[in-house]
Image (spheres, rainbow, N blue to C red):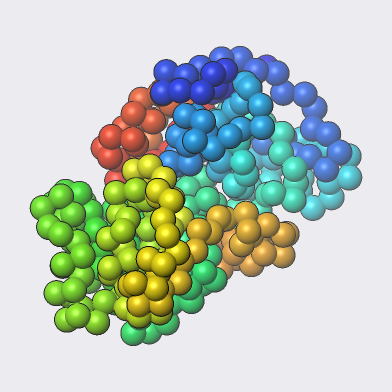
Amino acid sequence: MTKAVRVHQVGGPEAMIYEDVDVPPPGSGEVRIRQHAIGLNFIDTYFRTGLYKAPGLPFIVGNEAAGEVVAVGPGVTHFHPGDRVAYYSNLGGYAAERNIAADKLVKLPDQISYEQGAVLMLKGLTVFYLLHKTFKVEPGHRVLIHAAAGGIGLLACQWAKAMGAHVIGTVGTEDKAKLALANGCDHVILYKQENFVERVKQISRGELCDVVYDGVGKDTYPGSLSCLRPRGLWVSFGNASGPVPPFSIAELNNHGSLFATRPKLNDYVGTRPELVEGADTLFAAVLSGTLHVPINHAYALKDAQKAHRDLESRATTGSSILKP
């Protein structure tokens, strides 16, 4: 038996139940992990509410974590008990121990803590593909990053700045503005007090942005389109404020022959070689000092309901973890 947080019926934070679950011996190709830290992400709330559909009920929430291998199943040769590992995977993360397919795991360098590893896999790999694959950021590019003080936002601002971009971020409060400025933003827009479209036009002297990274969704549409130069790219990768409503593709034409994409992590690191490339690039950026991993909030796993309430009310900054 182990402790886990399960959802028996989708709904609000109260739908998450901290309870005993049985973990069988690892099967063929599987590894059993004792988890030391678990990442907290908006996608966890999407599954909990039913916005994203889980394969069935009940299910264990959570999509990234780090820990140590305690047992391996038949056929597993590249991981051994005692190995430090991290992963992202759809569901199953909010647990003290779990089984997972070995090909989902990467080895965690000794210099990177379990806490850092737990927030790097989903958030860090997301930033990796957004900046290196979806739109390859190069020196001189002007980028707009919504929710710049969030877990993904702070990593994206740091990395984009290190790649030579001119970084504009949007945030909700003065404290979050200071945080974003300290993590690579050249300009920060307080979207509750300022019209972010008009400020982008002012900051860029009318030249607008090459790319907008938008994990907010409903509240930043269609403003994000108005922040792009002709033939710019709108990357809509999340729904923190709710999903983007259906829109006419002619809107892209009206704003200057824009491109738009709705990417997801699985399509960029879905194969073992892609996962290893992404993790290697990400860990190298942390070890070199290019990326700092701010973990600003830690909750006990049994307090997952409070963690979700804080996340959804925008009370958190940077990355947050759960501790079994």
Query: With 296 as the anchor, is 121 left or right in this view?
Result: right
In the rendered image, the vertical position of residue 320 relative to residue 202, given as above or below: above
Give the quadrant of residue 62. top right
Q: Spot the residue most to the right.
A: 75
Q: Spot the residue most to the top.
A: 20
The answer to whether residue 159 is seen in the rendering is: no
**Quadrant housing the N terminus:** top right
Q: Looking at the image, which is closer to me, 139 or 295?
A: 139
In the rendered image, the vertical position of residue 12 relative to residue 176, given as above or below: above
Give the quadrant of residue 4. top right
Q: How many marks?
A: 0
In the rendered image, the vertical position of residue 318 relative to residue 111, given as above or below: above
Q: Looking at the image, which is closer to me, 67 or 100?
A: 100
Which residue shows up at 61% across the image and 62% down it?
268
Query: With 66 as the anchor, is 236 left or right in this view?
Result: left
Q: Looking at the image, which is closer to me, 248 or 208?
A: 248
Q: Position of residue 279 (x, y in %)?
A: 59, 61
Q: Spot the residue most to the left.
A: 193
Q: Position of residue 18 (x, y in %)?
A: 51, 17
Which residue shows up at 59% across the image and 27% down it?
60
Query: With 112 as the anchor, is 233 left or right in this view?
Result: left
Q: Looking at the image, which is closer to me, 281 or 254?
A: 254
Q: Position of residue 5 (x, y in %)?
A: 54, 23
The answer to whether residue 205 is seen in the rendering is: yes
Which residue shows up at 24% across the image and 58% down it?
170
